[in-house]
Image (cartoon, rainbow, N blue to C red):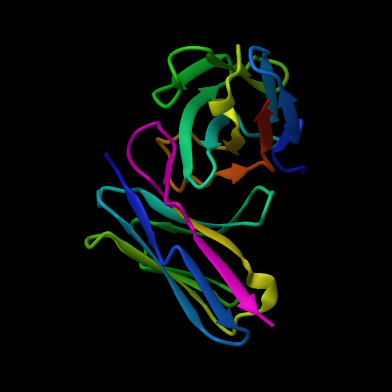
Amino acid sequence: NAGVMQNPRHLVRRRGQEARLRCSPMKGHSHVYWYRQLPEEGLKFMVYLQKENIIDESGMPKERFSAEFPKEGPSILRIQQVVRGDSAAYFCASSPLGPGYRPHEAFFGQGTRLTVV
Amino acid sequence: KQEVTQIPAALSVPEGENLVLNCSFTDSAIYNLQWFRQDPGKGLTSLLLIQSSQREQTSGRLNASLDKSSGRSTLYIAASQPGDSATYLCAVEGGGADGLTFGKGTHLIIQP
């Protein structure tokens, strides 16, 4: 059972380009969370998705950022018109249970390190 | 709004010492607390998860305690080894759907 898979591991984009980050949850997990880790900062929640639904996007910037988790395929975090401040590590976590069930252990991927030049 | 603080921010000790990492949180209404390890340029590895009804969890040389009412958790590492060098993150889960709230971590260096 492979762990949470994120790709690419490293991504370089020029200002104004689009960045697409992919996350394949662990087998059997239907709950996906995205977090962002800015340099010298802790991880911050961005969005929580279930298959075909966004459940909570309270941590997502209002503009340029979007996320999806289609019925088939990985979850995608999309950043349009990237700026230097978007440079960070983006982590995906998956869980077999939703937040209404306990215990609720999250399993993290290796992250995608986005650098905007 | 939940806030998680980890002390110290950095720690360097000789190999073999026992050590304690501290984590505090402002809202005691949590469902669980998780300790992670993060190696440079790598992802997060879950070390221990303590449910709100539990007082402690143990795994090998690691022991984590939870005092929910006072908003504190400690991670105890026994007989430290150079391979323990990493950043240790504490995270709590509240009642909403907004995932985990993380501290900034303790950067630990074990000197051979």
Residue B56: image location, x then y, percent: 41, 69
Q: Is residue B1 visible?
A: yes
**Most foreground residue, B67 or A86:** A86
Residue found at x 69% / y 49%? B41
> Residue placed at 61% from the left, 87% from the top?
B16
Residue at the extreme left = B69
Looking at this view, name the residue that lies furthest to the front.
A117
The vertical placement of A51 against B91, above or below, is above
Nearest the viewer among A19 and A45 is A19
Q: Position of residue B108 (x, y in %)?
A: 56, 68
Image quadrant where one finds the C terminus of chain A: top right
**Magenta residue span:** B91-112
- Camera-nearest residue between A82 and A52: A82
Instruction: Name the side, left or right, on which B22 lies relative to A49.
Output: left
Q: Residue at x 48, y 29 (%)?
A: A46
Snapshot quadrant of residue B99: top left
| Residue A4 belongs to the span the image colors magenta | no
* In magenta stretch: residue B95: yes
Is residue A25 visible to us here? no
How many dots with numbers?
Answer: 0
In the rendered view, tell whether residue B67 sits above or below residue A26.
Answer: below
Q: Is residue A27 above or below residue B2?
A: above
Who's the residue at 75% across and 36% down the image? A9
- The N terminus of chain A lies in quadrant: top right
| A111 left or right of B62 in image | right
Horizontally, residue B83 falls left or right of residue B63, namely right
Q: Quadrant of residue A92?
A: top right
Would residue A74 appear left or right of A89 to someone viewing this image? right
Residue A67 in which image quadrant: top right
In this rendering, is residue A43 above or below A30?
below
